[in-house]
Amino acid sequence: MTLSKQQLESGNEFAPRFNQDGLIAAIVTDAAGGGVLMFAYMNKEALRLTIETGEAHFWSRSRGKLWRKGETSGNVLTIREMRIDCDQDCIWLMADIRGEAAACHTGRQSCFYRRIEMGKEQNPGLSFVDE
Amino acid sequence: MTLSKQQLESGNEFAPRFNQDGLIAAIVTDAAGGGVLMFAYMNKEALRLTIETGEAHFWSRSRGKLWRKGETSGNVLTIREMRIDCDQDCIWLMADIRGEAAACHTGRQSCFYRRIEMGKEQNPGLSFVDE
């Protein structure tokens, strides 16, 4: 059954909208600090497993496989709260990250470790954020 | 020129990666409160205008047009800081939102006004967040 725009946006029925590749966007923030840790995509199975287990699962587009975050690094993301946006095509995960644990594969806590220089008409550079 | 993975992730060259539709994901958080306000996509022009003007611009997939956030509602998002993630396929905007201004078209400050019930094996419901 397809929900109306009104039901989709104002109801309490969970009806995630996956894109043409079967994926939904997922933003992960640090439940304590509030900053954005990472951004990834989930397929239906990753979303189901995240809801059931309380640990973040994603779909790796580069590797073409389901991915339990931390399965190799040990840096599991435990979900404190999950939200969905108005038109149900994006998930927000508030996660607990342990101590010095990294959400980013580069070893940094957050994937967003570089700033874009604002106000540049062309070729803005990037500067590294002190963390 | 295509950057190596090393240059893309560890360099200070801005090289945003647009998807097959010419879009890049953009997360907007409240620079003061820290919560996620909205999620949208930018095309190259929207990204350029955001960097140049310091006000958020997006590409509306539903309307098929460039969209200066707040052009009809007046709820302009002024960018305090922009970051990009490790593999340069997602932008994080930290925005100033004025007073009671809404980032969501439903009139709410954030698009993420509903929680997903965790731990449910099937059909989790949504509950509205008190704000």
Image (tube, coloured by chain):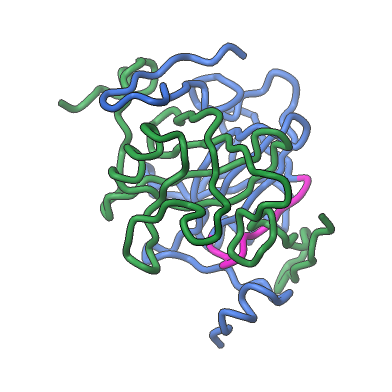
Chain colours: A blue, B green
In magenta segment, residue A28: no
Quick check: A62 above or below A121? below
Q: Position of residue B117 (x, y in %)?
A: 77, 62
Side (left or right) of B26 relative to B3: right
Residue under the image location 30 percent in, 43 percent down: B18
Quarter of the image that includes the C terminus of chain B: bottom right
Side (left or right) of A38 relative to B22: right
Q: Position of residue B27 (x, y in %)?
A: 53, 44
Quick check: B85 above or below B75? above
The stretch in magenta equals A80-89
Residue under the image location 64 percent in, 30 percent down: A75
Q: Position of residue A131 (x, y in %)?
A: 62, 14
Quarter of the image that includes the N terminus of chain B: top left
Q: Position of residue A56 (x, y in %)?
A: 64, 46
Quick check: B84 above or below A108? below
Quick check: A92 above or below A118? below
Q: Give the quarter of the image for residue B105.
A: bottom right
Foreground residue among B12 and B121? B12
